[in-house]
Image (cartoon, helix red, strand yellow):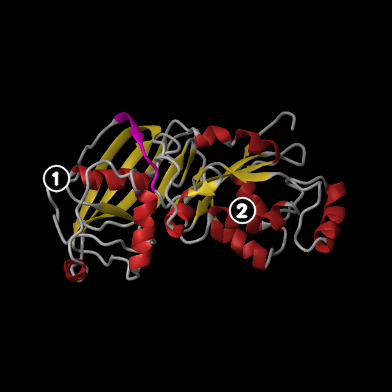
Amino acid sequence: MPKVPSSLPLSGLFALAKPSGPVSMSLVNQMKPLIMNTRLFVEASKLDNSQTQQKQKKGRFSRNAVKIGQGGTLDPLADGVLVIGIGKGTKHLTSFLDCVKVSYSAQAYIIGLIGGYDRNTTRLPFSAAKPTPTIAKGPRYEWRLGNMSLAPPIFSALKMDGKHLYDYARQGIPLPRPIEKRPVTVHSLEITEWKGSDHDFRFPEKKFTEEQKQAVARAMNGIEDQVRVDDEPETEADNASNVAPTAFVLKMKVSGGTYVRSIVHDLGHAIGSAAHVVTLTRSRQGRFALEPTGKDDIGCVAWEVFAKAAENPGEPDADGWLEWEREVLDKLEIVEGKE
C-alpha cells in the first residue's frame, strides 16, 4: 500500500520506465497535464484556477505551474530508468547527471559502421570485413575498466557553440574544434550473452546518399583520429548486409554522462572491427532501478500508467486517489525544504 503523506502538495523524485521510441522530453510534456492537475503536487485552492488558465492558454501553463524536469535524457532508441523531478525535486536532478553508478544493458552488432553508433542512424559506407575477430565468445569479456576519456558520438544532442552536434553532421558543417572527450568511469563491463548470428536484427535499410556521406566526412574531419576501419567498395558492404551480423549482449556499470554508444563503438575498434548498438536499456540510475534489489532501491512507474490516465483517468479509490496517483505515490521519494 502506498504511503499516505501527512501534508500536501508534495515535491519529490520518481523514476519512469521509459519505452523505446519516444524522445524523453516528449514523455515529460505528455505527463504535464496530469502533474499540473493533481492535489499531489498542486495546492487544492489553485487547481480550479490553474485548469482554467491552462485551457485559456491552449496548453501553455500558468505562472503557478509546478516545476518538472528529468535527470538525464535517454536517446529515443533507449528504454529504462528516466528520473523525474517535481517541484523542489528538480533541484536534485543534477545529482543524477553526475551519478556515481548507472547500469545499462546493450545488445550490439559486430561489423557495421553506423554514423550515430546505433541502429536508428542511416548506414555509412563500411567494409565487409572482420567478423568476430579476437573477441572472446564466452559469457564474460572484460574491456577497459576504471577512469578514461570518452568522446561522445557526433550524432548526439550535445551542443558546440550553440549548435547540436547532429546538426553539424547532417548539414555537413565542419566542427569548430574536435569533440571534447569526457572523463568517465567504467566500473564493470561484461558480455552476458553471445548471440552469434542467431537473432532477427538487421542493418539499417536506409543508406546515406553520396552528398550525405561527404557532409558527414566534412563534419567529422579531424575528430576520428583513433583506429579506423577502412571503407571498401559499396558492393561488398551490400553483400555483407545479407548476412546476419554477429550480435552480443553487454552489461555495464558506468558513471553518469557516459555514452554507451561510444563504449560499444570503441570496443569494436579495439578488436579491429566496428560495432554499434541495437537495443539499449538503462536498468539503474542511482537508487532508482527497473528491478529493485536492495532495501533502499526504488522501482519505476510504467509509462503505460500515464498513457492510460491521459486517455481516461478512471475513478478515484476510497481515499480519493486515481490509479496513476497511487502508482507515483508508491514510488515517490519526497523532497523537503524551500523552493
* Quadrant (top left/top right/bottom left/bottom right) for the C terminus: top right
Rendered location of residue 119, percent (x, y): 35, 60
Rendered location of residue 256, percent (x, y): 45, 36
Pointer 2: what residue?
Answer: 28
- Separation of residues labelled 1 and 2 (CA atoms): 41 Å
Label 1 element class = loop
Q: Is residue 154 magenta?
A: no
Name the one closer to the observer, 207 or 31: 207
Residue 101 against residue 215 in the figure, above or below: above
Residue 136: mark = 1
Rendered location of residue 25, percent (x, y): 58, 53
Name the one closer to the observer, 336 or 154: 154
Amino acid residing under circle 2: Val
Left or right of residue 14: residue 245: left
Main secondary structure along the magenta-highlighted residues: strand
The segment highlighted magenta reads: 146-153
